[in-house]
Image (spheres, grey):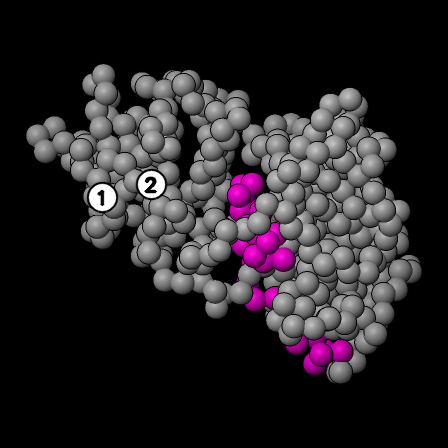
Amino acid sequence: MNDVILSPLDERDHIYGNLNFGARAPRPSKYRAPDLPRKHQAWSLMCVNFALARGTELDANDWYGKQCPPLAPMFGHMNTKKIDGAPSVGGTYWRSALAAAKNNGFCPETLYPFIDDANTRKNIFPKPSNEAIAEALKYRIGAYARISTLNEVLDAIYFENGVYISMAIYESFWKDYKGYLPKPTGSLSGYHALIMDGYDDNWTMVVDGIEQTNIIHITDSYGKTTGDEGEFYLPYEALDWFNTYSVDRLIMEMWTTYDPENIVATDYNEQHQIDVMHSAYPTVKLTPGNIIALVDDVEIAMSKAPFIANGTTLVPLRFIASAFGCNVQYYSATGNIIIWEKNLHRIIRLTKGSNIATIGDKEYVLLEAPRIIDGVTMIPVRFVFDVLKYYVDFEPITKLITIKGMN
């Protein structure tokens, strides 16, 4: 099973956590997208577009307020193979499929029925009719963005109708756990694309005598022949397997689609990730004891002012990271703090109470361990220079701290 090619990092990718959708109602503790008819990709390598067609049907149901006709995955795959740069390979990239769906859409399956034969497996497809091409324009996605954290996953499932994933397939995938996906074990056999389309904050299930809680619902594209009749259940903690970049990571990449009309003007509110639209490499100025910071000379109120402890200046991590386009996720159960550096180039791990930061297998010793004060993570300003590699200047008389991004 190797239906999906992992999308390389690209600085042009939007990051879902950096987008500002304004005030939204709280998501419910449990959500499941409408259970559309299951499709079966047979022996084809079109899983990316099978998942994307399903998600587009869910989107269209919202747009038109009525049941969308079943959409044609092969139409999407045909257009994807024209642009993905891998014409001799059966599978494809998520980014290419999303770009094709944005430009060309999906036509109803009645106008371009699925065929699994020797020709389509070699990317030789029937020519679509003019009607199919025209109808497909009704079912295009609006925009797409990468996803990196659990909170983003849950928000995107509820607000955007789903999250598209590349999942590593290990031997443990084939074990009978009634659809539950355990931490991967055994050898890696390839990669598969699926859609996350539900979650439950209060779900419980006993697996090998251990109670498992909190799951993300995943729908497969092999009819009802895999998992729990075509459904899988992924524990929330599996997103931490992803975030640690461990050798046994299960979820390799995640994307969602969204309506760009829902984006509001950036307000630099820390409750949303700061999307630095005014400068790719901003200048941030702050002073111990002052809750107001300057980002490219724009005054912004932080959730907590920097302060000096034991001769070390501590600054609010989320504010600094967000100003430079990073995502931050705190896992209260383990005390782990995960920083997704701008455009997902690196993942940095901190732990509450520990003065060790790690990037891959490399460790950095901090002057002070991260502190969480009134719900705000504070880190030594030297961490910004030594680990994040931003330029830091300290004015000893005024105590002004200036942080500049470096390309």
Q: Quadrant of the C terminus?
A: top left
Q: Position of residue 168 (x, y in %)?
A: 72, 38
Q: Residue at x 70, y 45 (%)?
A: 217
**Is 137 drawn above or below residue 393 in the view shown?**
below
Q: State the separation of the CA atoms marked 1 and 2.
A: 10 Å
At label 2, the amino acid type is Phe
Does 39 appear in magenta? no
Q: Quadrant of the N terminus?
A: top right
Q: Which of these two is toward me, 154 or 360?
A: 154
Name the residue furthest bottom. Answer: 130
Q: Please give the residue where the numbered disc 2 appears in the rendered image.
A: 319
Residue 80 appears in the figure:
no
**What range of the chain is rendered magenta?**
132-161
For label 2, count other residues whose C-alpha is less than 10 Å away and answer few (under 14), some (14-19) or many (20+): many
Q: Position of residue 152 (x, y in %)?
A: 53, 46
Q: Residue at x 73, y 23 (%)?
A: 210
Residue 50 found in image quarter:
bottom right
Residue 18 appears in the figure:
yes
Q: Position of residue 231 (x, y in %)?
A: 79, 46
Q: Which mark is residue 293?
A: 1
Q: Are marks 1 and 2 in contact (CB under 8 Å)?
A: yes
In this rendering, position of residue 267 left or right of residue 163? left
In this rendering, position of residue 351 left or right of residue 43? left
Q: Residue at x 32, y 19 (%)?
A: 368
Q: Residue at x 54, y 54 (%)?
A: 145
At label 1, the amino acid type is Ala
At mark 1, the secondary structure is strand
At mark 2, the secondary structure is helix
